Amino acid sequence: NAGVTQTPKFRILKIGQSMTLQCAQDMNHNYMYWYRQDPGMGLKLIYYSVGAGITDKGEVPNGYNVSRSTTEDFPLRLELAAPSQTSVYFCASRHPGSAQETQYFGPGTRLLVL
Amino acid sequence: GENVEQHPSTLSVQEGDSAVIKCTYSDSASNYFPWYKQELGKGPQLIIDIRSNVGEKKDQRIAVTLNKTAKHFSLHITETQPEDSAVYFCAATLSGGSYIPTFGRGTSLIVHP
């Protein structure tokens, strides 16, 4: 299994541009998450999904959108990039149920907005 | 909602020493406490976890303790090695359901050879 994969690894955007961060997992996990990580601030939840067709906002959803059309994919969309969205973005997935709590994280996408 | 405080933000030790990272949580309903290790340029990876019905859990050089009354839990690493150098995150959550853990801000552990 490849686990959780993310593309691209690094991207520079100009203010106002848009882009989609891709996330895919091959573990048949129902639950998927998007986090952003800023220096010294830990992981902040942007959006999450408990299954295909179901998404919900996390702690910091403003400026982002998500969709979940399949179990495998959970893309994150930035419509109008702003410098405040400069961050490292992590996607994670998890099997539902309390028996397997582990979140599996992807390698991250580093985004710079100038 | 849940609030997790993590200390220290940076910890520097000599190889072979022990390292302790402490976290406190605010929501008494939280019953699952994972610890993640993040190496440079990589995503976080679970290293150990503990549930509220257990006071301590060990896995080789790593141990976690939980004090439910005081609402704090700690990560203990013994006989530290340079490859233990990384950022460590604690988290707290209610097991099951949509599972939305709250993460601490992270501790950068530096092990000097």
Image (tube, coloured by chain):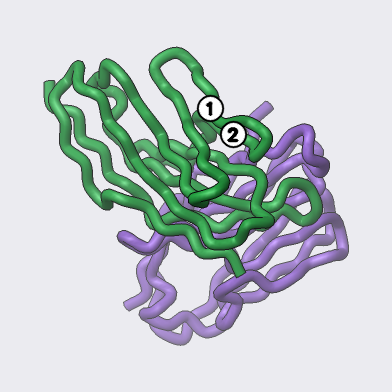
N-term mark: 2 or 1: 2
Q: Residue at x 48, y 33 (%)?
A: B65
Task: From this view, report whether residue B95 is shown above or below residue B16.
Answer: below
The span from disc 2 to disc 1 (Cα, nearest Å) is 7 Å
Q: Give the mark count.
A: 2
Amino acid residing under circle 2: Ile
Mark closer to the observer (2, 1)? 1
Among all residues in the image, which is located at the extreme top? B60
**Residue contact at pointers 2 and 1, CB within 8 angstroms:** yes
Residue carrying label 1: B56
Query: Picture coordinates of residue A112 (x, y %)?
Result: 36, 68
Amino acid residing under circle 1: Glu
Q: Quadrant of residue A21?
A: bottom right
Question: Is residue A39 at all visible to an observer of this figure?
Answer: yes
Q: Quadrant of residue B40?
A: top left
Query: Picture coordinates of residue B47 (x, y %)?
Result: 50, 29
Q: Residue at x 49, y 38 (%)?
A: B35
Q: Colour of chain B?
A: green
Residue carrying label 2: B50
Q: Residue at x 22, y 47 (%)?
A: B10
Task: From this view, report whether residue B99 is shown above or below residue B108.
Answer: below
Q: Colour of chain A?
A: purple
Q: Are the residues under marks 2 and 1 on the same chain?
A: yes
Question: Is residue A32 at all visible to an observer of this figure?
Answer: no
Q: Chain of mark 1?
A: B
Would residue A25 be found to the left or right of residue A69 on screen? Answer: left
Would residue B110 be found to the left or right of residue A76 on screen? Answer: left
Image mark for residue A98: none
Q: Secondary structure at mark 1?
A: strand
Q: Quadrant of the C terminus of chain A?
A: bottom left
Q: Quadrant of the N terminus of chain A?
A: top right
